[in-house]
């Protein structure tokens, strides 16, 4: 005779254990399938892992800036500071020198193009624009700027299908990354009323096979600020402290001979592969902590003297003469300059294989011969 077996009722703790085991057994096949799909990539998907330069990267893919841009921004806020060098860019500048000053680089070129930096925090197109700059400098000279490089297209999602060689550069091309570093860095220097509004820069590349400037005149730039680097050849001459109106007039009239006394010690020459930021006539930024407001006299002077905090500088003398420190000038000169795209000068151009003499005393941003 069989007896009825009465199973004991499960306790609450054992019930939770049974439910947990069931969930694990159900989720394990799905987890295994997910892992297998993620580790098995089709050839088409593998190619997509190397983004095309024309496709945007997400903000978390943006490379960290190498230069000490934040300290440069703080230093420029001091009214007594008119120029500052940005350390940490040596590797990028050496890369640009390798490409833009090598055997395959153009002998004569003048290019100015807008680079969209997008505040450095959203889907960026700076790499795309810097790729266009690279192709314009290193590729075959286009018939016109708009044929190979659509300078006028400011659409953030635009594709540059006409420049097929861009697809061969890759997303980590060192020269393009170097240009992007400089563009994003200069864009981060927008301050005061331009901060958050001015997110783009105009990048200019000038290659001169025969640099022959004759006694260029000292001047200041009619822009908020300008980033500048000499890749090869003589560097710009600049004053590392601000000039009063009569000091500026003396420099304009007599050149280096107009400097007297201790002021001559303020004249410097930019080194090759040195990136400097020079304040222009329209620089405006809040005072840094610890710096008191200017006196009433200085404030009044600043209202009538637009160059009160600007860096006075000039292009170096040409090959037939000596610079202010006695050094001979080389014939070839390649420079980069970057201006904030503040809306005052949006001109873009591409001129290649055109030899020219570098005129003196040209202070307007719109001049294509200003360095």
Image (cartoon, rainbow, N blue to C red):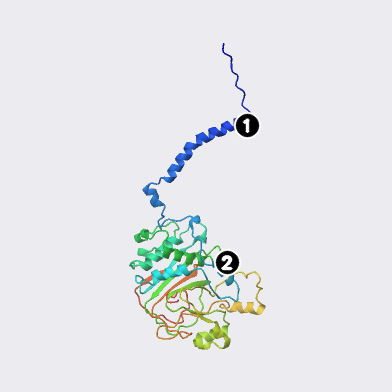
Which residue is disc 2 drawn over? 193
Which residue is disc 1 drawn over? 13
Residue 207 x/y as whole percent = 39, 74
| Quadrant of the image occupied by residue 137 | bottom left
| Residue lying furthest front | 1
Q: How many numbered tags mark residues here?
A: 2
Res. 64 visible in picture: yes
Please report the residue visible at 60 percent of the width from the left and 21 percent of the height from the top: 7
Q: Quadrant of the N terminus?
A: top right
| Quadrant of the image occupied by residue 285 | bottom right
Which of the pair 45/370 is nearer the observer? Answer: 45
What is the secondary structure assignment of the residue under circle 1? helix
Location of residue 358 with respect to 191 vertically, above or below = below
Res. 347 visible in picture: no
Task: Compare marks 1 and 2 and give the one earlier in the sequence.
Answer: 1
Residue 247 x/y as whole percent = 56, 85
Label 2 crowding class (10 Å Cα cut-off): few <14, some 14-19, many 20+? Answer: few
Please report the residue visible at 37 percent of the width from the left and 77 percent of the height from the top: 209
Which of the pair 20/303 is nearer the observer? Answer: 20
Residue 283 x/y as whole percent = 56, 72
């Amino acid at each position: 005779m069989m007896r009825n077996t009465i199973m004991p009722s499960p306790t609450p703790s054992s019930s939770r254990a049974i439910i947990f085991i069931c969930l694990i057994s159900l989720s394990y096949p799905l987890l295994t399938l997910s892992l297998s799909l993620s580790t098995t990539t089709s050839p088409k998907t593998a190619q997509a892992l190397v983004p095309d330069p024309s496709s945007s990267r997400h903000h978390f893919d943006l490379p960290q800036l190498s230069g000490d841009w934040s300290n440069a921004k703080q230093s420029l806020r001091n009214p007594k500071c008119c120029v500052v060098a940005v350390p940490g860019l040596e590797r990028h500048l050496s890369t640009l020198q390798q490409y833009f000053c090598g055997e395959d680089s153009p002998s004569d070129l003048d290019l100015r193009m807008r680079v969209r930096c997008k505040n450095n925090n959203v889907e960026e197109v700076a790499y795309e624009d810097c790729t266009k700059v690279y192709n314009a400098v290193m590729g075959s000279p286009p018939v016109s700027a708009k044929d190979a490089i659509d300078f006028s297209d400011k659409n953030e999602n635009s594709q540059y299908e006409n420049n097929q060689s861009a697809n061969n550069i890759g997303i980590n091309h060192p020269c393009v990354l170097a240009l992007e570093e400089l563009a994003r860095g200069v864009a981060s220097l927008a301050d005061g009323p331009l901060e958050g509004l001015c997110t783009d820069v105009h990048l200019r590349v000038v290659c001169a096979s025969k640099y022959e400037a004759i006694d260029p005149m000292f001047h200041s730039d009619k822009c908020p600020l300008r980033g500048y680097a000499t890749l090869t050849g003589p560097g710009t001459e600049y004053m590392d402290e601000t000039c009063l109106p009569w000091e500026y007039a003396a420099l304009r009239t007599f050149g280096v001979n107009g400097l007297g006394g201790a002021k001559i010690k303020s004249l410097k020459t930019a080194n090759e592969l040195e990136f400097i930021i020079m304040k222009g006539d329209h620089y405006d930024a809040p005072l840094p902590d610890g710096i008191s407001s200017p006196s009433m006299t200085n404030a009044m002077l600043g209202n009538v003297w637009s160059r009160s905090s600007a860096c006075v500088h000039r292009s170096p003398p040409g090959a037939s003469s000596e610079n202010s420190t006695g050094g001979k000038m080389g014939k070839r000169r390649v420079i980069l300059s970057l201006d904030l795209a503040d809306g005052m000068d949006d001109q873009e151009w591409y001129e290649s294989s055109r030899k020219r003499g570098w005129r003196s005393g040209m202070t307007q941003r719109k001049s294509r011969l200003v360095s």
